[in-house]
Each structure stands twice: as C-alpha cells, then as structure tokens.
Amino acid sequence: MRVTVKLGTTLRAKAPDFVGGEGALELPGDGPLTVRDVMDALAIGPDEVNIIYRNHQLVAPAAHVADGDRLALFPPNFIHFSQFYLRRRTD
C-alpha cells in the first residue's frame, strides 16, 4: 500500500528523506491499516500529533487508510481553526 504523507513543522525531522516534509510511504500489505499504523511506521508517537487530515478531511488516528490516500500530520504546536470547529472522522 502506498500513502502520501505531509509532515508539518517539527514532525519533518521524522522523515528526513521527504522533500519539503512530503513523501510517499510504502506500507506492507493491502489493509486494513489506520493512520496510527502510518504514524508507527514513521516512529511518530500519539502525543506528537494534534491534527490529522486524510484526503483533506479531519480524522482521528483510528481512521482507516487506503492505497493512494494522502495524509497530513501536524504537531501540537501547530494551531489551526479546524481543531476547534470540525469533528474528527474515525472511519
């Protein structure tokens, strides 16, 4: 399974091979996988991420990930209006 991942600010140090904080990640198997599995593959702990987007929708770490999905992960020091106004999807 191939997922595109964009890492915000301080999380970029977790994937130095990504260009501008963005890169493709190959995960074993074809599912079912979650955002948490992607975070584990990048050695990113749950306390290091505050905002997660999957295909431009705010989601929780338990949300499923499919081949071709695009994830954006942002740390707690990144403030965005969505964390206050949008409900996180878990599916």
Image (cartoon, helix red, strand yellow):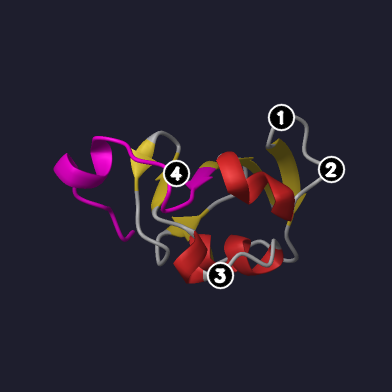
Q: Which mark is residue 32?
A: none
Q: Residue furthest front?
A: 77
54 shown above or below 26: above
Quarter of the figure with the C terminus: bottom left
Cα separation between marks 2 and 3: 19 Å
Query: Dots 3 and 1: beta carbons under 8 Å?
Result: no
Crowd tier of the residue under label 2, counting other residues whose Cα lies within 10 Å: few below 14, some 14–19, many 20 or above? few
Q: Which mark is residue 17?
A: 2
Q: Which mark is residue 20?
A: 1
Cα separation between marks 3 and 1: 21 Å
Along the line of sight, which residue is nearer the eye, 89 or 16? 16
Along the line of sight, which residue is nearer the eye, 34 or 22? 22
Q: Is residue 78 magenta?
A: yes
Q: Is residue 6 magenta?
A: no
Q: Which of disc 4 and disc 3 is earlier in sequence? A: 3
Cα separation between marks 2 and 1: 9 Å
Query: Dots 2 and 4: beta carbons under 8 Å?
Result: no
Q: Which of disc 4 and disc 2 is earlier in sequence? A: 2
Instruction: Give the residue at x 48% y 46%.
Output: 74
Q: Which residues are magenta?
A: 72-91
Q: Residue furthest right?
A: 17
Crowd tier of the residue under label 1, counting other residues whose Cα lies within 10 Å: few below 14, some 14–19, many 20 or above? few
**Which mark lies nearer to you, 3 or 4?**
3
Q: Is residue 81 left or right of residue 49?
A: left
Amino acid type, callout 1: Gly
Crowd tier of the residue under label 4, counting other residues whose Cα lies within 10 Å: few below 14, some 14–19, many 20 or above? many
Q: Which residue is mark 4?
A: 54
Along the line of sight, which residue is nearer the eye, 33 or 52? 52
Amino acid type, callout 2: Asp
Cα separation between marks 4 and 1: 18 Å
Q: Which mark is residue 45?
A: 3
Q: Is residue 4 left or right of residue 69?
A: right
